[in-house]
Amino acid sequence: MNILLTLARGLVLFVALFGFLFGQVFNGQFTPGAGLAGIFGLFSALVGTTRLQASPRWARAVALSCLLALLGVALDVWNYYQHLAIAGSYYAWILIAPFGAGLLLILFQALALTRSRPPGRAGDGGGAAT
């Protein structure tokens, strides 16, 4: 599972950085959906597994970040088909489908880490009180 999660993080990082963020700068067209997908996808990919295991707060932050990145993808798809669709052109599903699958994998891992620990005291990292 760690290898699959590492591959998913690498893919999400690549698509968020070069597909969404750099793509907007290169084309000179900035949209809220692509910005959300790029920024929150980048955050989801860069926060490491050790940080997720250290605190349930980080796991919740990553889960929320994944949801916001998926919302950004949905907004970007809507914007494309509403305003930019040209006959013979298509949305870049070959990059976006694996990006969404990677975000879902990161999201499920973060939710599993959130639910696997007892709450503990505030500020102790989420472990049981000793």
Image: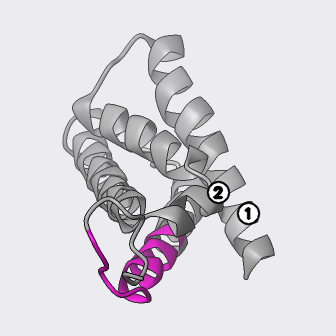
Left or right: 38 with respect to 14? left
Q: In which quarter of the image is residue 7?
A: bottom right
Q: Which residue is drawn at 52% across and 49% down?
A: 92
Can residue 94 be seen here? The reply is: no
The residue furthest front is: 130
Q: Residue at x 55, y 22 (%)?
A: 22
The residue that label 2 is drawn on is 9
Which quadrant does the N terminus fall into? bottom right
Can residue 103 be seen here? The reply is: yes
Q: Residues within 10 Å of mark 2 (few under 14, many from 20)?
A: many
Which percent across, then down, holds residue 98? Answer: 59, 64
Tell me whether the residue at label 2 lies in contact with that at label 1, contact meaning CB atoms closer than 8 angstroms.
yes
Which percent across, then down, holds residue 123? Answer: 32, 59
Q: What stretch is highlighted in magenta?
A: 106-121
- SS of the residue at dot 1? helix
Q: Quadrant of residue 8?
A: bottom right
> For residue 118: magenta?
yes
Left or right: 6 with respect to 64? right
The residue that label 1 is drawn on is 6
Left or right: 78 with respect to 37? left
Which percent across, then down, holds residue 23? Answer: 52, 25
Q: What residue type is labelled 1?
A: Thr
Task: Name the residue nearer the viewer: 22 or 44.
Answer: 44
> For residue 128: magenta?
no
Determine whether 126 is above or below 94 in the image: below
Q: Distance between the residues labelled 2 and 1?
A: 5 Å
Determine whether 62 is above or below 41 in the image: below
